[in-house]
Image (cartoon, rainbow, N blue to C red):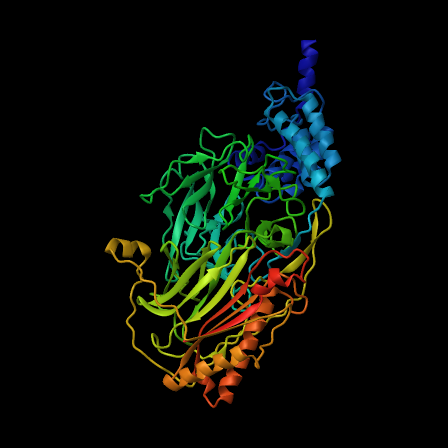
């Protein structure tokens, strides 16, 4: 019997298919060069197509490859069908993975075949092979737990796909996406700056010969794209911080867009770095301090809008399982606290990654292979409760989540749009960047975002010393925000139900100031403010006649619609996107020049160190006018006594001084408008109508309308969430107005 058994085993061995090639492919597998190994296994398999082991090796290599998992299924199926039953147990005599003469396949081929069917959306077939493997594998087999988890995930997938969410998914388009993988998008709070990771050839082709052997593609680099005033993404720019060789990847960007969180693989020890924007140059990435980085693997992180809390992912010892999400907080001395695991409600025995904290500081998105994932990583959301605990994570659903890995996801401040990358939806390359529009009920609450442009005179750069101070008038707390020098964009997160003073300064001299009140509403509020630098402080004049055209800052871009046609495969439909012309403000007839010496801005920290306190300037106006509008109304009642009084005061000012500085503020409620398309468009239309009426009235009074200088434009969308009660004028009426101020 022993002789027969030995003969039977020997019968499974065949002629050497090419020991040199087999050994080289095995070496590539050990070095994680899976795509290269797959190509070699295929060459060997072509000479011996009935070899179950070579089919298995080819399928395994594809399943472990960077971007070729979809090629694995037919090879794994052939290996499973050709495998001799009861032979080839794991870690037992009878199957030798390193023997070139081996012709059989190991039992785990059925697990991997189930996973391949799972990724292809064939859940019944996946269950068949997952179940087959579970029935045959021993309890000490590590793959048995994975197969059991696979059965749970296919059950989750059936439920989630049967209840698809009302999400509108769009490709960001060919300006950002290219033929190489583009992924891991992060976006600034104002929606004007997009940072992402790409494996594309650099514009100067300097990396054309520098190839990552694992992926067979250029190393990962960080790029940035900015929106123009019409809401169009501009051509991506390679950041100055990318290394010549090695990976650098996007992780997160601070609320003001001035600090980038990055990932670097330091000889296998993944760490988190940060880089700060200095003028138009990003500083050299510095490893984040405190208890954030360790000898373990730190893969991702997210900074809260106030900069006081940092959430990050690590597989350090002592966690719940695999990679977990941790948190550190800023101590009074400016250092980070010890890391705290977020606990079993968030973290699972499986893997967590891709954490993102919304600007509201309460809503967190993260990826997990645990919870009710439908396969690989899914995106989940959770909300921090008043007592500091987190709500049960919710799978945000199909079709955003798929059966493959869905990891890196960020949202805009209003919570209505998310950005992510996918290789499952067609597109321009192996991975593309997409955005998803959520229904209104998913809009953020309890958050106000102040965002806009600081606009220098035409043809002049923004002075490096430009800075915005925001003072809480109740507490006296001051925060400073630095506009981006290249385009003047700034953003600040404001708590509702408070009065603030806004002080825009150049060389520590106030060029514009005003007081604002952020309404006490739970709904998301957006304050768009475009400020012209005071013509007295800088050479050149900004005239109200030359109101810039284009979309307000942070306007949401149009994409190319994506239609989901079934699990595992998605088709793309393209919408024609008309480009709008960018119009630069014309130079006014009158020029008032003053020579200024550039100075370095003094931050809050510098002022504190110097013992100097910010003094809130006088924000009063000589004349103010307000008109409240009904639903969809925009016209000014020029016969109104208050209007006539306002015009008279403006004319009187022009008799005393050569110019009058004007601020226009318009607002729309959240009541939907079909007439104007969006509430922001309605708000902007009200602003434009007030501008025209003011110019006409001043000209009719015999004064030069070019003497009206534009201080700032404020257009808002605010008030309570719309609940189908548009006739409730008491509820929405006070948020439908236009205000004119003169000084």
> Is residue 48 visible in this depiction of the protein?
no
Which of 723/321 is in front? 723
Q: Is residue 364 above or below residue 232?
A: above
Point out residue 360 in the picture as x, y percentages from the top left corner.
50, 49
622 on left or right of 576: left
| Nearest to the observer: residue 635 or residue 536 | 635
Q: Is residue 102 visible?
A: yes
Where is residue 498 shown, x and y percent of the image? 45, 56
Spot occupied by residue 80 in the image (x, y as percentages of width and height): 71, 30
Kindly identify the residue that appears in the image at 36 percent across and 52 percent down.
284
Q: Residue at x 66, y 24 (%)?
A: 13
> Which quadrant does the C terminus fall into?
bottom left
In the rendered image, the vertical position of residue 515 relative to residue 59, given as above or below:
below
Q: Residue at x 59, y 21 (%)?
A: 91
Q: Locate the N terminus and report the quarter of the image it occupies.
A: top right
Out of 732 and 112, give the one closest to the viewer: 732
């Amino acid at each position: 019997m022993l002789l027969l058994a030995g003969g039977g085993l020997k019968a499974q061995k065949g002629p050497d298919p090419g020991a040199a090639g087999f050994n080289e492919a095995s070496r590539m597998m050990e070095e994680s060069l899976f795509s290269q190994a797959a190509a070699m296994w295929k060459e060997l398999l072509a000479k011996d197509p009935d070899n179950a082991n070579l089919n298995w090796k080819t399928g395994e290599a594809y399943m472990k490859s960077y971007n070729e998992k979809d090629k694995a299924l037919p090879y794994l199926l052939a290996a499973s069908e050709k495998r001799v039953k009861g032979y080839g147990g794991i870690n037992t005599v009878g199957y030798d993975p390193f023997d070139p003469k081996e012709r059989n396949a190991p039992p785990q081929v059925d697990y991997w075949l189930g996973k391949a069917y799972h990724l292809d959306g064939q859940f019944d077939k996946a269950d068949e092979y997952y179940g087959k493997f579970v029935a045959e594998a021993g309890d000490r087999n590590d793959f048995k737990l994975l197969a059991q988890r696979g059965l749970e995930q296919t059950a989750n997938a059936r439920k989630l796909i049967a209840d698809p969410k009302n999400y509108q998914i769009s490709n960001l388009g060919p300006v950002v996406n290219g033929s190489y993988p583009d992924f891991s998008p992060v976006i600034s709070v104002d929606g004007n700056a997009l940072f992402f990771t790409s494996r594309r050839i650099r514009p100067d082709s300097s990396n054309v010969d520098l190839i990552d052997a694992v992926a067979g593609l250029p190393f990962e680099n960080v790029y940035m794209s900015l929106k123009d005033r019409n809401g169009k993404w501009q051509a991506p720019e390679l950041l100055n911080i990318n290394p010549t060789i090695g990976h650098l990847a996007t992780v997160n960007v601070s609320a003001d867009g001035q600090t980038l969180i990055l990932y670097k693989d330091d000889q296998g020890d993944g760490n988190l770095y940060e880089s700060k924007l200095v003028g138009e140059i990003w500083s050299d990435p510095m490893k984040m301090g405190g208890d954030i980085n360790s000898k373990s693997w730190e893969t991702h992180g997210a900074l809260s809008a106030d900069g006081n809390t940092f959430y990050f992912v690590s597989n350090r010892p002592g966690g719940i399982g695999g990679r977990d999400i941790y948190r550190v907080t800023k101590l009074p001395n400016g250092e980070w606290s010890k890391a705290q695991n977020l606990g079993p409600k968030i973290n699972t025995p499986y893997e967590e990654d891709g954490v993102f904290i919304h600007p509201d500081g309460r809503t967190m998105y993260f990826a997990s292979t645990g919870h009710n994932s439908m396969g690989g990583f899914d995106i989940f959301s959770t909300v921090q409760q008043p007592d500091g605990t987190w709500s049960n994570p919710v799978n945000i659903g199909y079709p955003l989540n798929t059966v493959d890995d869905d990891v890196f996801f960020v949202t805009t401040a209003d919570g209505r749009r998310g950005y992510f990358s996918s290789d499952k939806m067609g597109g321009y390359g192996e991975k593309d960047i997409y955005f998803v529009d959520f229904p209104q009920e998913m809009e953020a609450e309890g958050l106000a975002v102040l965002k806009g442009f600081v606009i220098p005179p035409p043809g002049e750069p923004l002075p490096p010393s430009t800075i915005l101070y925001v003072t809480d008038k109740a507490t006296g707390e001051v925060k400073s925000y630095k506009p981006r020098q290249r385009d003047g964009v700034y953003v600040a997160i404001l708590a509702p139900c408070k009065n603030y003073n806004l002080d825009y300064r150049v060389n520590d001299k106030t060029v514009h100031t005003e007081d604002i009140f952020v309404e006490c509403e739970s709904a998301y509020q957006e304050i768009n403010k475009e400020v012209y630098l005071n013509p007295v402080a800088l050479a050149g004049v900004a005239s109200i006649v030359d109101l810039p055209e284009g979309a307000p800052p942070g306007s949401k871009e149009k994409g190319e619609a994506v239609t989901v046609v079934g699990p595992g495969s998605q088709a793309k439909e393209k919408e024609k996107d008309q480009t709008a012309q960018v119009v630069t403000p014309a130079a006014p007839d009158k020029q008032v020049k003053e020579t200024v010496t550039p100075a370095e801005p003094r931050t809050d920290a510098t002022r504190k160190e110097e013992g100097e306190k910010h003094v809130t300037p006088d924000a009063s106006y000589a004349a103010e006018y307000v008109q409240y509008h009904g639903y969809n109304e925009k016209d000014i009642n020029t016969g109104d006594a208050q209007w006539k009084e306002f015009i008279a005061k403006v004319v009187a000012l022009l008799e005393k001084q050569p110019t009058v500085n004007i601020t226009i503020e318009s607002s729309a409620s959240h009541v939907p408008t079909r007439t104007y398309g969006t509430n922001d468009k309605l708000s902007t239309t009200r602003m434009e109508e007030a501008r025209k009426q003011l110019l006409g009235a001043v000209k009719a009074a015999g004064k030069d309308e070019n003497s009206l200088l534009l201080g700032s434009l404020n257009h808002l969308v605010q008030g309570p969430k719309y609940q189908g009660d548009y006739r409730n004028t008491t509820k929405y009426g006070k948020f439908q107005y236009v205000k004119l101020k003169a000084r």
